[in-house]
Image (cartoon, rainbow, N blue to C red):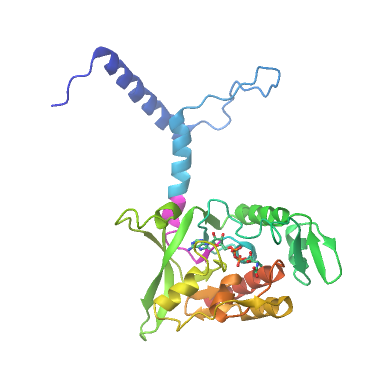
Amino acid sequence: MAPVATSGRQSEIDALRAAAAKYDRVDDHVPVGTKYDVLEDYQGSYRFAPIEEAQVSRAMIKRYFTNMYERAISDVVIVGAGSAGLSCAYHLASRRPELKITIIEASVAPGGGAWLGGQLMTAMVIRKPADRFLREIGVEYEDEGPFVVVKHAALFTSTLLSKVLALPNVVLMNATAVEDLIIHSDFEGKQRVAGVVTNWTLVALNHDTQSCMDPNTITAPVIISATGHDGPMGAFSAKRLVSAGLLKELGNMRGLDMNRAEPAIVNGTREVTPGLILTGMELSEHDGSNRMGPTFGAMIGSGIKAAEEAVRILDT
Ligand code: 48N
């Protein structure tokens, strides 16, 4: 039998219940065009529209978990929102608006290694012909002949990220890690990647501190993995192919050679096992191709190639 609340506590409970009833009405049926007594004033009289804390919570919860529910089945999942993953997402989502494209990014901040050029310097070098993509997304650069220079890598990455997020068919789930692949056998017994296994990144990084923090799943006919070559989870899918017995061993990224590395990554971008395309520097770990260091044209080209590969698979 619950203890009877004191009169003071009861009135608090009644007030919360009344507010909850009001929020439900407000959350779901705020009359469009309601005028609020607001004032953008910087002389000391700034006034905001009224808010209840539950409205903020519900505004976030409703949207995030609706996305999560709807994207449990996606058309394409892109793992990793670095320069290759984001270039791929932009090219694919802008050309195929009917596709449900879901990006899973382990870091809170998407962008991977493209916030800086090399050795923490800010300018970003992009070799021609990848400069065409900069014109497509509207990033200014200085032309230096065989290559162009974006004054700050963050200008490229933030512009690309904003363009990707503005596309209605893209959902980005950052701070979320892919911690395994869904691998099915088809009717011929051939194994194919059919989705990803996800968890909050902070959970994925703490499985040895807590047991049984089971993951979630997203199924899709095409997975594009762009998890890079370094970082806490670099080359994730390539490594998982080895441990799952779908790849004998990693090729392991070779030494730096810009002229060999960039065409090898773009031309080598492909479906490495049924249902899984590798792009960007993760591919160098899979194939054993050279690294290119602080030049990003191949990330753009490889991302675009991965998008084209995904279309080829989906359209067959
Ligand atoms: O920027 P990265 O690391 O990877 P790419 O391939 O998009 O770009 C690579 C590029 O920045 C270079 O490395 C340059 C060209 N240097 C080359 C060289 O020779 O040194 O982005 C990978 C993204 C990151 O944001 C990670 O947080 C994320 O992938 N990620 C994951 N996201 C979800 N689940 C995972 N398991 C996971 N692993 C990595």
Residue 27 vs 104, above or below: the answer is: above
The quadrant in which the N terminus is found is top left
Up the image or down, 312 lies above or below 13; here it is: below
Residue 316 visible? The answer is no
Looking at the rendering, the quadrant in which ligand 1 lies is bottom right
Residue 76 magenta: yes
Compared with residue 49, is residue 274 higher up or lower down, i.e. above or below? below
Residue visible at 44% across and 43% down?
62
Spot occupied by residue 109 in the image (x, y as percentages of width and height): 57, 51
Residue 197 or residue 21, whichever sits in front: 197
* In the image, residue 222 lies in the stretch drawn in magenta: no
Looking at the picture, does residue 9 appear above or below residue 260?
A: above
Q: Which residue: 32% across, 18% down?
A: 12
Quadrant of residue 28 in the image? top left
Q: Which residues are magenta?
A: 66-80
Q: Position of residue 87 (x, y in %)?
A: 64, 64
- Left or right of 215 in this view: 259: right
Rendered location of residue 151, percent (x, y): 79, 55
179 relative to 307 in the view: left or right: left
Q: Could you tell me which residue is drawn at 53 percent across and 51 percent down? A: 108
Q: Which residue is at the far bottom? A: 188
Q: Quadrant of residue 259?
A: bottom right
Q: Position of residue 104 (x, y in %)?
A: 50, 59
Q: Quadrant of residue 96?
A: bottom right
